[in-house]
Amino acid sequence: MRSMRLAPSALAPSALALSVLALSLLPLATVHAEPPTYALHYALMLDGEDPVAGEVACFVGKPCEFTPSPASKMTFKFSRRQNEIEITCPERECSLAYGESRTYCGTCEEVGVFEGRDNGGVEKLLVLRSYPQLGTLLLRYRTP
């Protein structure tokens, strides 16, 4: 038997062709990475109503909107990045601190919900007005 030795340059084109052929036969894999999420636990305790608790999955870096109680129809939008919470009440006037619909809440663990709201910033009085408290919203979340 006679063996034949080929120069490495003679193998290079065929090895390259085999590699290209092998790669072209592999299915194209597309990676769809889901954005990171965190769980936001809430409890809404309104005067005269049963307490409501629940959990909602929120995306990191985006405001998290949730409606704890269909009966009260209050919608909250929590922004963990800005430590800010916003409230919307379609059927009655409600607010957070100082009659505002949006407020900075620090760690946002306990937020008061009040009746009435400010007049939208058209006229600001130099005296703080007190609003009757409707209840409390408790929030817990774990940083991913």
Image (cartoon, rainbow, N blue to C red):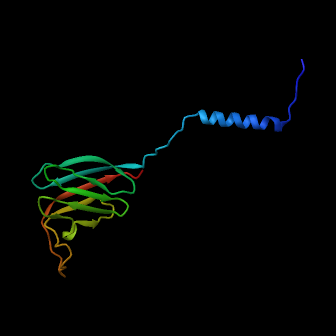
**x and y percent of residue 94 in the render?**
15, 63
* Above or below, 85 relative to 26: below
The quadrant of the rendering that contains the N terminus is: top right
Query: What residue is at 14 percent from the left and 53 percent from the top?
Result: 72
**x and y percent of residue 119 in the render?**
16, 73
Residue closest to the far right: 2
* Above or below, 32 relative to 134: above
In this view, the residue in front, 43 or 90, is: 90
Query: What residue is at 15 percent from the left and 55 percent from the top?
Result: 46
Residue closest to the far bottom: 126
Query: What residue is at 14 percent from the left and 69 percent from the top?
Result: 131
**x and y percent of residue 4 in the render?**
88, 26
> To which quarter of the image does residue 135 belong?
bottom left
Query: What residue is at 25 percent from the left and 66 percent from the top?
Result: 102
Q: Tell me how many marks there are.
A: 0
Residue closest to the far top: 1
**x and y percent of residue 127 in the render?**
17, 80
In this view, the residue in front, 129 or 56, is: 56
* Above or below, 14 relative to 46: above
In this view, the residue in front, 25 or 64, is: 25
